[in-house]
Image (cartoon, coloured by chain):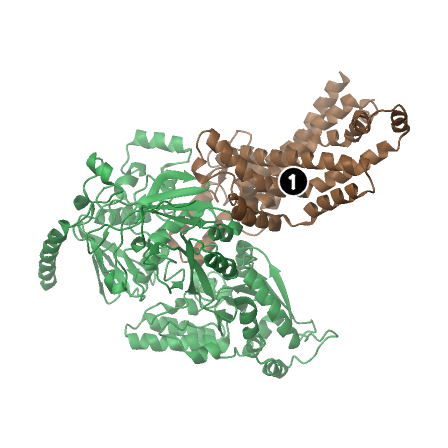
Chain colours: A green, B brown
Amino acid sequence: MLDRCFLRFAAALLCLSTAAHSEVLRESGYWKRQVELGELPPIEERVPDEPLVVDLEAKGRSFGTEGGTLRTMVSRSKDVRQMVVYGYARLVGYNEKYELKPDILRDIEVEDERKFTMHLRRGHRWSDGHPFTSEDFRYWWENVAQNEELSPAGPPEFMYVDGTLATMTFPDEVTVVIEWPGRNPGFLQLLAQATPPFIYRPAHYLKQFHVDYAEPEQLEIAVDNARVRGWAALHNGNDDLGKFDDPALPTLQPWMNSDVQTASRAIFERNPYFHRIDARGTQLPYIDTVEMTIVGSGLIAAKTNAGESDLQARGLDFPDIAILKKGEADGANYRVLLWENGAASQVAIYPNLNYSDPVWREVMRDVRFRRALSLAIDRHMINRALYFGLAIEGGMTALASSPLFDAADLAAWSVYDPEMAGLLLDDMGLTERNAAGIRLLPDGRPMEFVVETAGERQEVENALAIVTDTWRDIGIKLVMRPSDRDILRNRIYAGVTMAAVWFGWDNGLPQSYTSPDYLAPTDQVFFAWPMWGQYYQTGGEAGEPPDMPAAERLMELAQDWKHTTSAQDRERIWREMLHIHAENLFGIGILSGAPQPIVVNRRLRNVPERGVWAWDPGAHFGMYRIDEFYYEDPQAKFTQ
Amino acid sequence: MMFLKYAAYRFVTMLITLLVVSVMIFVIINLPPGDYLSNQIAELRSTGQADGVAKAEFLRTEYALDRPLWEQYLIWVGFAEGPQGYFGLIQGNFGWSFEFDAPVADIVGDTLWLTVLVNLAAVLFVYLIALPLGVIAAARSETWADYSAAFVGYLGLATPNFLLALLLFYYGHKYFDLPIGGLMSPEFEGQPMSWEKVKSILVHLIVPTFVIGTSGAAAMMQRLRANMLDELSKPYVETARAKGLTPTRMLVKYPLRMAFNPFVADIGNLLPAMVSGSVLVSVVLGLQTIGPALLQALKSQDQFLAGFVLMFVALLTLIGTMISDLLLVLLDPRIRYGARAQ
């Protein structure tokens, strides 16, 4: 009751303030003509009644001017979906301090991590001008997620907590309530992901493909024209907010698909109904159009060097820095910024504790063996040889910019000490060697440690080449086997790989409120325990239960984290889990924080000099809000 | 009559070969564990995209990937009834590409003429370089001209294509403002032909043609040189010289024509090469030909796209060899119809 009163009062206040700023809203130059012709309503009617006013000054950013085209490159035609990642309009999103803030939502109330009350912005519209309301959430929940033909497997997993499905209610057109009987602490983080689940869909557009709403004859014709088998396939084909390749599908992102979409180029234009404005009344995004060119991955560095990109990080790796810096020094039209990579490790080796060979499995499960492997890696040499000494040497743990960072964990068992490594192996009883000096397994086979890679990254192969030398010194022969991403995954999930190399944890910047599930054996994507992960994921139908004390403890801690809400408890749990990983070396990290080159047009403003290049949380550029980037002089023509 | 019978016989064996090839292609594409969609699901899960999983599951049934392999094959070719009825290669449905999310026919159709263009340009370039150099090398054999021609040819053969391409791109852009990669400026894509577009394509073709051409020229040069040297030592050349023909005329009138014989037999191989040539170079140079699409399809097990492209190339190869066989039968009396025709 009290709440409601308060809300009304707040709404009244907001109405006042919107009235105040609606007078200073500026019409966009890009849409001016359409507005004059009456094809588009004026700016006052396009932004929500309560737009998100971004506080540029608080971020140390400057007010921008509208206009210009941002050129960027990707390497595959399906990468146009990066626009959803870069645009980063989310129900709730991270700011640069990794705090979750309402974005598309005006506000969100969370009770006990069970009940999420979402308040939409009144007057918020899809990019086609149709109102965005709770109906769009209802449509997704009732007509898509719970429709047997569209979702044969039932509603998506993330809507279940401890096996119980959420209840969603829609009190009015700007309120959505999602509720579970148990706690769902990771729900907001899920909504803020780089690739979030879209729990809202443009109902007004999709209803024409839905059997419950569409005219039967019309639907019949549409199904025939699309040459698909039924209405469900048609609906599925048209309903993909994450793919970002359909100009007809409305969006809430800062830029929307234009008609220009060929095999090698896609152009996105500003969304006239976007919900963010700056304090001067200019609607964001500042930049009018984004031109995404699809080029061969091997050419991105060369083309960037030739000044053909205004904002580029995708397709550029550490080794490209030299040539890019040279171009910058030779007076190119770009600057090269070095951001920190947000993965917990640049290169990490995962011995497979569920490997199908019993002898090797026992050896790898012995913590002394994993420690020996780690101690016998000369991280300093790898850092100097591959990263000019700019990366951070050490095991896999939270990065230094995370509040959970502990220097002891970083250094644990990761300072080069081949003597100690040899002693550990001797201690295990692996003292027999063959003529080549390679130690023998308990059953007499030589210790040929096969490490499989996805064959995508040169730096991995270079690092392993150096590791091969230092491991030979302790009597272990490293054999590298490059394959392909998909094949590698399938082999690991089947338990037939001895060890694999991948990045460290995607999220090297955990906070105490980040779910620690990925540190526990809950998922096969952590390559050290594919079988344990499968066991948890399938509720015991596949895989095998964890049977090592450390892994069981991790599982226990992850559960404990769910059942507490106190920040102190959660931090304590996190620290213990990180410590277990550092001591047990389930993933043997080599280096972290390698610089990621970010190439920025010299005239582009508001791009942070220092940032973290991370997929999630971070959404690459998304968290840094590309919509606030602008050109110093947007009208100046590019010299192609 | 005999010839027609032979042609018909060749045609039937060609169809049988094609059928066998189609089985092999389908089996080999599906040899790696998993299929496109299961890999897709693994990828989505590992990047925490719960949203796409349901969609991928949906597509599995839609395209019959949940059925046994033999059944998938029969549906693909059109011998068995799939989810959409009898609708396979035979019925003119080339399938769906998951990777590009478009009908296979569209992807192949868009890239086919560019592929032919690139390969045609490369073949012409090879001929332009190799023929004169080969002839000079033969006519002036064991001289500096011969050695420098060989040097140029082997240099082209020995330089890694992609390295040469990157170097040419870098310096070409720096000094001649040549574009990097691609086959035309993006703004011309999907536009009707125009003078500007033609110009853009020609400028973009310079580096790829050079890169592909240099690697192929050496082999051709050496073959031509060897053939020419064989001919030049024959008595009729002596006679021609004795009769006082000018050296150029003497070279062109007989020996060169005789040396060309093996190249005529090569015409059969040209047809498939027009489509499947230069895959790796196209990948490195970012050309919008069929090569990169095929490689991507094979890597991600996009079975319908990969299968169709491979089938198409197989068909062209078969047609090419058939044409050259029939031509040889017509032209060369020494070739018999084989034991069957007795």
* Residue at x-position 74% and y-position 22%: B6
What residue is pinned by disc 1?
B213
- x and y percentages locating residue A206 in the rendered image: 30, 40
Please give the count of numbered marks on the rendered protein: 1
| A601 shown above or below A95 | above
Q: Is residue A265 above or below residue A8?
A: above
The quadrant where residue A248 appears? top left
Seen from the viewer's position, the closer of residues B69 and A308 is: A308
Q: Label 1: how many residues lie within 10 Å, few (<14), some (14-19) or many (20+)? A: many
Quick one: A413 or A463, which is closer to the camera? Answer: A463
Q: Quadrant of the N terminus of chain B?
A: top right
| Amino acid type, mark 1 | Gly
The residue at 50%/67% (across/down) is A529
Res A495 visible: no
Up/down of A43 relative to A3, above or below? above
Q: Position of residue B190 (x, y in %)?
A: 44, 34
